Amino acid sequence: MPRILWADDEIDLLRPHVLFLEAKGYDVDSVTNGADAVARARAHRYDVVFLDEQMPGLGGLDALTEIKAAQPGLPVVMITKSEEEHIMEDALGGQISDYLIKPVNPKQILLTVKRLLEGEKIREQKASQDYLQAFGRLSMQLGGDLDVAGWEEVYGTLVRYDLELEGAEEGVRQILEDQYREANGQFARFVEEAYPGWIAAAKAGEKPGEARPPLSHDVIPQWVLPKLKDGRPVVFLLIDCMRYDQWLLFERLLFPLFEVEKDWHVGLLPTATPFSRNAIFSGLLPIDIAQRFPRRWSTSEREDEASLNQYEEEFLQDLLARKHLDVRMRYDKLVSQADGATFAESVRDYLQHDLAAVVVNFVDILAHSRSDTAILREIAPDERAYRALTMAWFEHSWLYAALQELARQDCTVVVSTDHGAVRALRATKVIGDRETSTSLRYKHGRNLKVDGSDAIFVKEPEAYGLPRGGINENYIFARGDYYFVYPTNYHRYLNQYHDTFQHGGVSMEEMLLPVATLRPRG
């Protein structure tokens, strides 16, 4: 039975309130002064304390300090006749859980108790009911003829319920996870049918609109460069491997600082840094990058695909030149903690440039580190914990500190990502020759063979806007949560890469990506 301690020098007048709570199943202890309240809180376990602010002897605020020292996590509700602002500030500074003005009525007290003791459970139950009611509607949407906007709506809805149901019972979570998997399967079929048409429209010079959605190579031309006309410095932050659910958590901290305008873009295939990020900075499809910069996309370099990301600054300068923009530009890639700390300390210097483009690699490093480090897998065993780990980093990071400083300046900040990541849970066998690339969610090479229900096979790379390394080269992209494993040492690699976060394939998490424009509220 939940226990309540109520301290008020007029407790006899509140006897009906006490009886009402007891009738609702609560055990209520009452005292008439602050000293007795402190003594009881030290000697017994309580779930909630109601504390009168004005009591003879030890007052409510002083009693609050001593109670919190004895039991820091104990919820305390301050009750007072006074509405003076300094009393409210003192109480809030003392870490109260709620603040009520006399006279209070029994139902008001009951609602406060329920919110403090059962609020999370009630919210989870309500979220579960809402999701189960929405389940049928989402299933009908998945069975319909969705366009990109429809898929963005479905994905956004699933992410919202995923966040709201974090503490829900396992049965509801399982239903949600099954629907996520079903949605990703349908999404892969949609992409397989629609993607070549998007690329054809892009090649024909069609701007994002009815013929195609905004793709990776549209991000800077559509959301960054137009902001330069406002006359304010523009900071473009590209957070490598950031999923939409992670962005929503970051956004919660940024809302008090910025007005946030949110859009979507679709990540180019393969959803991997060498392809999608280079497309962002160059404003070109991968096939056009290879043609315009042949020395930056040679066959030998493709065997070490990390080397393909050495030229982002050059690609951005070329994009600005093609757009005939004479702007002062700065580019930085932040890989280490030292890089980030330096950025946070000198972030105002970046505003001396018209455009500052900054790549933040931490989220991608975290995803790969979880794959390689047993202790990180234990700390973040599932997507909920992985999100929480990312959020814990951001809240105490140099990136958040830098954004807080930017919020005090007259500037525009655009935040996006090159791709997301999906939790790889199902393996599928792939066959290729020695020259085949080694990525887990996509491969390119000759004579590739894979189960067509597990992957999209691209016979003509040009139709996907991709360069061809040889006459017989093909690409394959894993669908949903599949990952590729060679038959040789199959079980070893099956276990090594199971339940790791990967990218390069076709899933909502990897391809449906946020673009946020932040304007300081100040």
Image (tube, grey):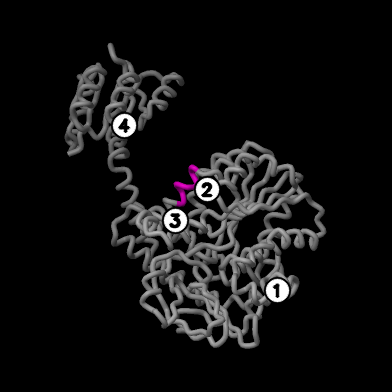
**Residue pointed to by mark 3:** 160
Q: CA distance from mark 4 to mark 3?
A: 32 Å
At 51% from the left and 84% from the top, the residue drawn is 432
Q: Marks 3 and 2, Cα distance to the nearest angstrom?
A: 13 Å
Q: Residues within 10 Å of mark 1 (few under 14, many from 20)?
A: some
The secondary element bearing badge 4 is classed as loop
- State whether the magenta stretch is mostly helix, strand or loop: helix
Q: Are marks 1 and 4 in contact (CB under 8 Å)?
A: no
Which residue is at 61% across, 43% downward?
Answer: 342
Left or right of 208: which side holds 1? Answer: left
Amino acid type of the residue tagged 4 in the rendering: Pro
Q: Which of the two marks, 3 or 2, is nearer to us in this view?
A: 2
**Callout 3: helix, strand or loop?**
helix
Please tell me which residue lies in front, 459 or 4: 459
Eyeballing the image, is 466 above or below 372? below
**Residue at screen point 37% across, 28% down:** 99
The residue identified by callout 2 is: 251
**Real-space Cα distance between discs 1 and 4?**
61 Å
Q: Earlier in the sequence, mark 3 or mark 1?
A: 3
Circle 2: residue type: Glu
Q: Is residue 108 something one can see in this rendering?
A: no
Which of the two discs, 4 and 2, sits closer to the camera? 4
Magenta run includes residue 401: no
> Which residue does the numbered mark 4 point to in the structure image?
72
Q: Earlier in the sequence, mark 4 or mark 3?
A: 4
Side of 297 relative to 11 (left or right): right
From the image, tell me which residue sits under label 1. Answer: 290
